[in-house]
Amino acid sequence: EGRRAAVLIAAAGVIGFFANGCEHTAATWLSPYGVRWCGLADERMAVMTSNYWTSMSAGRVAWAVGSSFVKSAWPVLLLNIALCSIGSLLFCSTSEGALLAAALSLGVGVSSIFPALVSLPAELRVEMTPQRLAVLQLMASAGEMLCPFAVGILFQMRMYSSFGPALTGMQAVAFTALATAFFVFRTPQPSYRPIRPADAVFH
């Protein structure tokens, strides 16, 4: 059980790293991407960035209201990553409509990933100790710092077209971590009956 718990916390940490990293990467570089690569005006991208934050806030309000009715965090996390993936792929386009749809999809997608991650261990009967919660917090904070920084380096190199693929890659890693944890916890554990000396047969 200790090994399974370690897999869960590691997977949750990876998801938190790239979920928060994706959230802050989009918030930081959405406007420069639209202006430099897609040729949109600063004013248009300011409105689009506002819509991104609005959709994220709406998603968090929806989670706060509906979380008590959620029976499992697995489908919530899968839906969140799917929405983030759709938004990331749409960012590969240069049309204003696609960018708006991408911003809205990504905003809703990242809105409730972290609270769902925190609730998952209790669902799987894994104790969320202060140390494990600290690991999740540190991984999420590291993602907030490193992912925008990495994309910023790409932008400094004028590789603006890497924005959508970079976000998509983050979601691919997050989905892999989620699938790994799911299959580990859906695989039944073998039950071993200790062999007593009286049961042993000697030849």
Image (tube, rainbow, N blue to C red):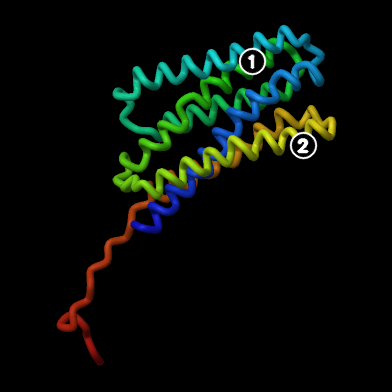
What residue do we see at 41% from left, 17% from top? 62
Image quarter where the N terminus lies is bottom left
What residue do we see at 75% from left, 22% from top? 33
Which amino acid, by three-letter code, is at mark 2?
A: Ile
Front residue (pair 193, 175)? 175
Expressed as whole percent of the image width and height from the top left, the position of residue 199 reads: 18, 80
What mark, if any, has residue 153 been given in the picture? Answer: 2
Which amino acid, by three-letter code, is at mark 1?
A: Thr
How many other residues sit within 10 Å of disc 2, few (<14), some (14-19) or many (≥20)? few
Query: Image check: 7 left or right of 124?
Result: right
Expressed as whole percent of the image width and height from the top left, the position of residue 121 reads: 35, 42
What mark, if any, has residue 195 been given in the picture? Answer: none
Q: CA distance from mark 2 to mark 1?
A: 21 Å
Front residue (pair 201, 172)? 172
How many other residues sit within 10 Å of disc 1, few (<14), some (14-19) or many (≥20)? many
Question: Which residue corresponds to mark 1?
Answer: 49
Q: N-terminal of the two: label 2 or label 1?
A: 1
Regarding mark 2 in the picture, which secondary structure is present there?
Answer: helix
Query: Image check: 12 left or right of 36?
Result: left
Q: Specify the farthest residue to the left.
A: 198
What residue do we see at 67% from left, 22% from top? 90
Q: Quadrant of residue 53?
A: top right
Expressed as whole percent of the image width and height from the top left, the position of residue 29 reads: 70, 25
Query: Image check: 142 left or right of 193?
Result: right
What residue do we see at 45% from left, 26% from top? 112
Front residue (pair 183, 14)? 14
Image quarter where the C terminus lies is bottom left
Query: Image check: 77 left or right of 41?
Result: left
Q: Specify the farthest residue to the right.
A: 158
Q: Is residue 140 above or below residue 49?
A: below
The number of discs equals: 2
Regarding mark 1 in the picture, which secondary structure is present there?
Answer: helix
